[in-house]
Image (cartoon, rainbow, N blue to C red):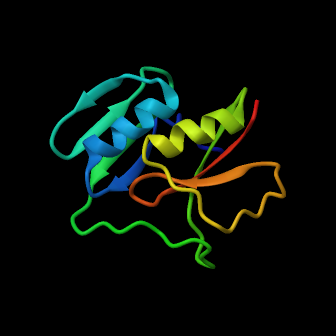
Amino acid sequence: MAVHAELTAITIDSADPRALAEFYRKVTGWDVAQADDDFVYLGQGPIRLAFQRVAGYRGPGWPDSAKHAHLDFKASDPEATVKELLSAGATKPEFQPGEDQWTVLADPEGHLFCLTSA
């Protein structure tokens, strides 16, 4: 028997949910749908991004042999988008394994995400 459950949100641990949500609001263009001191939800669609406060949170290292989840985004002009995200607080790690197929970036708290062309 298969269980059918609908994915409603991807929740990211954070030291500062409001600040991290603001960064991803710039990435996605999604509005804040719900917020309090410990949680912020972006988007109104069937899947939302959520950010939850975790005391003492520290982002993952990169590269790291431990498995971590990450988000993938596509953009019509990846080079310009990378520049905009860097100015919004992202960082670009030296290790870039995609052979120019994608760019690995880290958000202001160190969560990794990839950007590729649309």
Percent from the top left, x then y, of residue 112? 55, 57
Q: Residue at x 44, y 37 (%)?
A: 24
Percent from the top left, x then y, of residue 81? 62, 35
Closer to the camera in the image, 113 or 47? 113
Percent from the top left, x then y, of residue 54? 26, 60
Q: Residue at x 50, y 34 (%)?
A: 27
Which image quadrant: the C terminus? Answer: top right
**90 to 74, vertically: above or below:** below
Residue furthest bottom in the image: 65
Q: Residue at x 70, y 51 (%)?
A: 103
Q: Quadrant of residue 97?
A: bottom right
**Horizontal placement of 1 versus 15: left or right?**
right
**108 to 37, vertically: above or below:** below
Tell me if residue 18 can be seen.
yes
**Horizontal placement of 21 versus 5: left or right?**
left
Residue furthest left in the image: 37
Tell me if residue 5 can be seen.
no
For the image, the number of numbered tags is 0
Percent from the top left, x then y, of residue 53? 25, 54
**77 to 107, vertically: above or below:** above
Closer to the camera in the image, 101 or 83? 83
Q: Residue at x 20, y 47 (%)?
A: 38
**46 to 88, vertically: above or below:** above
Closer to the camera in the image, 10 or 76? 76
